[in-house]
Amino acid sequence: MLGAEIDTFSPASFLSSLPEIPLVGSTWVISSAIFTTFATTSFLTYEPKNNEISRSNQLSRSVLLTLFRFFGSMLLGFLAKPNFQILQRIRETKAVIPNFAIPAIFLFLANFTNSISLTRIGIPLTYTSKCGIPLITLLLTMLVEGRKALPSALTMVTLIPIALGIAAAAWDSPRFDTFGFLAAIMSCTAQSLLNVTSKRAISDTGVSGAQGQRAMVTVGFAITVIYTLIISIFSTPTRKIDSSTSREQQQQGKRLGIPKIEVPVWLTAFAVTAYHVEYTLSFMFVKLVSPISFATSDAIRRLSIIISGHYMFGGTSFSRLNIFGVGLALSGALAYSFCSNL
């Protein structure tokens, strides 16, 4: 079992002297709702003004985002500290990777399929599909940990209005895509499995949330690289076109699977940094609370993403059903907090 290291440049050290659970949880929700939502959606939907089309990028935007996120977060985990004890952190990470291999697989699946879902069906339907995470986490906790790990019956009942409220708040999708919807369901399931397995891995090893996150993104990066190599080998070669190609030829190129448009470095760096901060805080929070409490907080985080994404990227105005859903989810969260402390 490894001792928790001092993460001088990480959110862990900054927040260490303050009340952990409310502060880490609220910072995680806010950073995700504002920074990660903007960075992720902007990365996936970016279109440069000059309409230049990449000549070399044969990877989908979803694969690129996952690859950059894991690689960048891994580097930040190893390098973004003042003592530069890189070899020590590498040894510590290597020692706990076997414990975090399974959670890392679920982390990869949750991130990758979420990116696909956001690209194909957008924020509203993606998060409508994920409203069941608290309930699935509850079921998984019972299966893995047994009934003794479950909260009271009254507390469990409060998860229902939370799930229904999230669904109602996000119930507005101008587009539906079967593959995108299936990706959202897979992401929902993988996230629930991640909630339970990462909590157990952190408890078994005794490492900090930041250390656990570093181990998982390291494995996640390796999985993404392997996946990328496989699809690169078996993918059909694409034609090359340049910015002088006519609009009609460019449209034909899109239908033929021409590589997507490059994303600027600043936006990639922003997406990586926002992801690293969000997930470091996320796994710090996992260590502090039960998987069910984490899933409940995660549902409220997703509610905040629905609201912030609406105001950042537009869409139809919130309907009465959406507003009712927001109120229902918040009421359920308050009821959960109250009942869990009885």
Image (cartoon, rainbow, N blue to C red):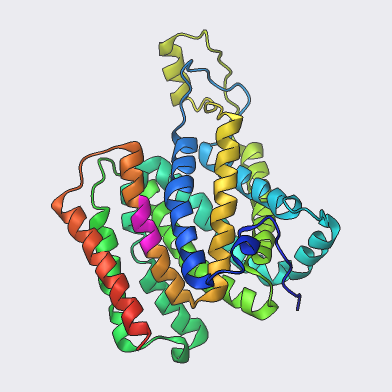
Quadrant of the image occupied by residue 219: bottom right
Farthest residue, direction left: 320
Residue pictured at 72% horizontal, 49% vertical = 75
Residue 114 visible to an observer of this rendering: yes
Q: Is residue 180 left or right of residue 64?
A: left
Name the image quarter holding the N terminus.
Answer: bottom right
- Is residue 66 visible in the rendered structure shown here? no
The spot of residue 109 in percent (x, y) is 53, 57
Residue positioned 42% across, 86% down in the render: 150
Q: Is residue 293 magenta?
A: no
Question: Magenta span: helix, strand or loop, mainly?
Answer: helix
Q: Is residue 286 above or below residue 279?
A: below
Image-based side of 252 in relation to 215, left or right:
left
In the picture shown, does residue 229 fall above or below 7? above
How many numbered marks does the figure carry?
0
Task: Residue 306: give x, y in percent of width and height.
Answer: 33, 51
Name the residue furthest bottom: 148
Specify the segment rendered in magenta. Answer: 300-305
Q: Quadrant of residue 54?
A: top right
Residue 301: say if magenta. yes
Q: Position of residue 94 (x, y in %)?
A: 78, 64
Residue at far right of view? 87
- Asked if residue 79 is positioned above or below residue 262 in the image, the reply reads below
The residue that appears at 55% across and 34% down in the rendered structure is: 267
Quadrant housing the C terminus: bottom left
Q: What is the x, y in percent for residue 207?
A: 69, 73
Closer to us: 165 or 20 = 20
